[in-house]
Image (spheres, rainbow, N blue to C red):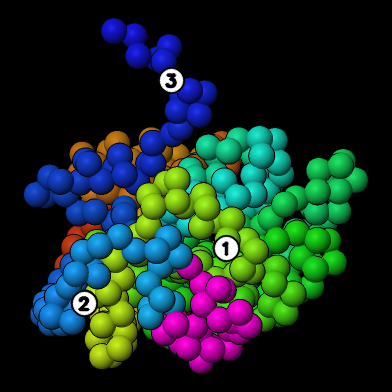
């Protein structure tokens, strides 16, 4: 049966995630996956979850197994507001400034529904998080990408682009940005540029969608304030997740922003899933209250920081073979490699998979899929230290062969 004729245009245009498809290929026992942005499962605080679950069942069992409000558990939202105040993020309307979502990926989809009409212009970083591109693309926007460097988004280029777009009658609705340990580039937007970005958004009248999944995962360097903590006009909407600070299996995130926007998101969420699971919200509440989450984060920072150093050392040891360049991250989960011009990371991926190592090719992170062909993303959070070293060695051999450099040179 030809099923295509029943499909909507939206369904026909939907693209599978490169990472999700790639993860299907990494099930081989000999495969070293440097691809997905997955936490290290060995670090999951299983015993602490057991304690939290037992406590939830004892004190809130029936409520935890019932539907929740669409906005999310009141007690959890109250605690989040309290914690946000400690970061300098003001919630003048209390819990009305925070809603829970089923992971921050759902928040991205809801933001797309909230703001994007087909043909609307939105601004993204180049490269950008592919999950956001996937979510927004269902709404058929016109993307305008802005380059980055080791200090993050080039705000001066952004200003030039916004001015040019407005002259064309294409004023952008919002900028989507991952300013802290950017995915995939791993860089942080400097404090100077953060302030300049907020000034530009106010002057040129566009919103900022700040995606902040990795902000707590800093190994070195001085912490940077979130864009939301610097926001004085309510122009920033911040998305966060517990996937990196507790576990992705909880599928819980939250949105911080203007109550008027959040009320609209709640209506859109009602038609999507009614509410996020009450059980996981209660578990998160317990983990926050007893300090288990903070303890876990500190352990993650220590382990990931060491793994990052292992990957950095392996990359440096093989740089003569690969000719690659990169910016060493101070946190997060990723290295972004740039190979010599002329090499195609997509073509090399087939040989890499045959050799037992996986990564994500660069074009997946661009709205223009001809860009980033000589780039690739590597993850260091999930693989073991020995897997990182062996994976980089395998990858270096593939790249060396493609560059036609004799072994041992």
Q: Position of residue 234 (x, y in %)?
A: 69, 72
Mark 3, mark 2: which one is toward the viewer? Answer: 2
Task: Left or right? Give the position of 220 relative to 194.
Answer: left
- Return the residue at label 1: 262
Q: Secondary structure at mark 3?
A: loop
Part of the protein shown in magenta = 78-99
Residue 170 lies within the magenta run: no
Quadrant of the drawing holding the C terminus = bottom left
- Return the residue at label 3: 7
Q: Which residue is drawn at the image coordinates 11% and 49% (left, top)?
A: 30
Q: Position of residue 77 (x, y in %)?
A: 44, 77
Task: Left or right? Give the position of 348 relative to 199.
Answer: left
Give whichever of discs 3 and 1 has the lower sequence position: 3
Q: Secondary structure at mark 2?
A: helix
Q: Residues within 10 Å of mark 1 (few under 14, many from 20)?
A: many
Q: Residues within 10 Å of mark 2 (few under 14, many from 20)?
A: some
Q: Which mark is residue 60?
A: 2
| Front-most of residues 15 and 26 | 15
Residue 96 lies within the magenta run: yes
Task: Left or right? Give the position of 64 relative to 402.
Answer: left
Q: Which residue is drawn at the image coordinates 58% and 38% (left, top)?
A: 139
Q: Position of residue 226 (x, y in %)?
A: 58, 78
Q: Which residue is drawn at the image coordinates 41% and 76% (left, top)?
A: 74
Can I make out residue 25 in this image?
Answer: yes
- Which picture quadrant has residue 119? top right
Distance Cα–Cα, label 2 vs label 1: 27 Å
Distance Cα–Cα, label 3 vs label 2: 43 Å
Q: Residues within 10 Å of mark 3 (few under 14, many from 20)?
A: few
| Front-most of residues 387 and 405 | 387
Give whichever of discs 2 and 1 has the lower sequence position: 2
């Amino acid at each position: 049966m030809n099923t295509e004729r029943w499909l909507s245009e939206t369904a026909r245009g939907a693209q599978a995630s490169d990472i999700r498809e790639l993860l299907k290929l990494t099930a081989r026992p000999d495969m070293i996956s440097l691809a997905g942005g997955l936490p290290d499962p060995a670090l999951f605080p299983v015993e602490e979850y057991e304690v939290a679950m037992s406590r939830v069942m004892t004190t809130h069992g029936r409520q935890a197994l019932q539907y929740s409000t669409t906005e999310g558990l009141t007690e959890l939202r109250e605690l989040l507001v309290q914690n946000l105040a400690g970061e300098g993020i003001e919630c003048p309307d209390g819990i009305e400034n925070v809603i829970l979502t089923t992971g921050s990926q759902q928040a991205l989809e809801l933001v797309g529904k909230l703001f994007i009409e087909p043909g609307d212009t939105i601004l993204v970083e180049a490269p950008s998080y592919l999950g956001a591109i996937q979510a927004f693309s269902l709404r058929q926007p016109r993307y305008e990408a802005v380059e980055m460097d080791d200090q993050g988004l080039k705000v001066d280029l952004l200003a030039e682009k916004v001015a040019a777009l407005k002259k064309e009658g294409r004023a952008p609705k919002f900028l989507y940005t991952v300013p802290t340990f950017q995915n995939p580039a791993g860089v942080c937007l400097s404090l100077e540029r953060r302030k300049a970005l907020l000034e530009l958004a106010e002057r040129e009248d566009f919103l900022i969608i700040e995606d902040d999944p990795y902000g707590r995962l800093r190994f070195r360097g001085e912490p940077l304030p979130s864009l939301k903590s610097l926001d004085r006009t309510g122009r920033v909407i911040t998305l966060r997740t517990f996937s990196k600070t507790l576990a992705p299996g909880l599928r819980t995130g939250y949105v911080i922003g203007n109550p008027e926007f959040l009320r609209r998101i709640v209506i859109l969420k009602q038609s999507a899933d009614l509410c996020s699971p009450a059980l996981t919200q209660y578990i998160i509440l317990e983990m926050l209250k007893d300090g288990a989450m903070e303890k876990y984060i500190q352990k993650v920072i220590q382990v990931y920081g060491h793994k990052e150093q292992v990957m950095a050392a392996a990359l440096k040891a093989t740089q003569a073979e690969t000719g690659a360049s990169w910016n060493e991250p101070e946190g997060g989960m990723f290295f972004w490699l740039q190979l010599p011009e002329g090499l195609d990371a997509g073509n090399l991926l087939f040989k890499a998979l045959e050799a037992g190592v996986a990564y994500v090719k660069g074009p997946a992170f661009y709205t223009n899929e001809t860009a980033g062909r000589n780039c690739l993303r590597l993850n260091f959070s999930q693989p073991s230290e020995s897997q990182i070293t062996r994976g980089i060695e395998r990858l270096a051999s593939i790249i060396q062969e493609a560059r036609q450099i004799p072994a041992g040179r």
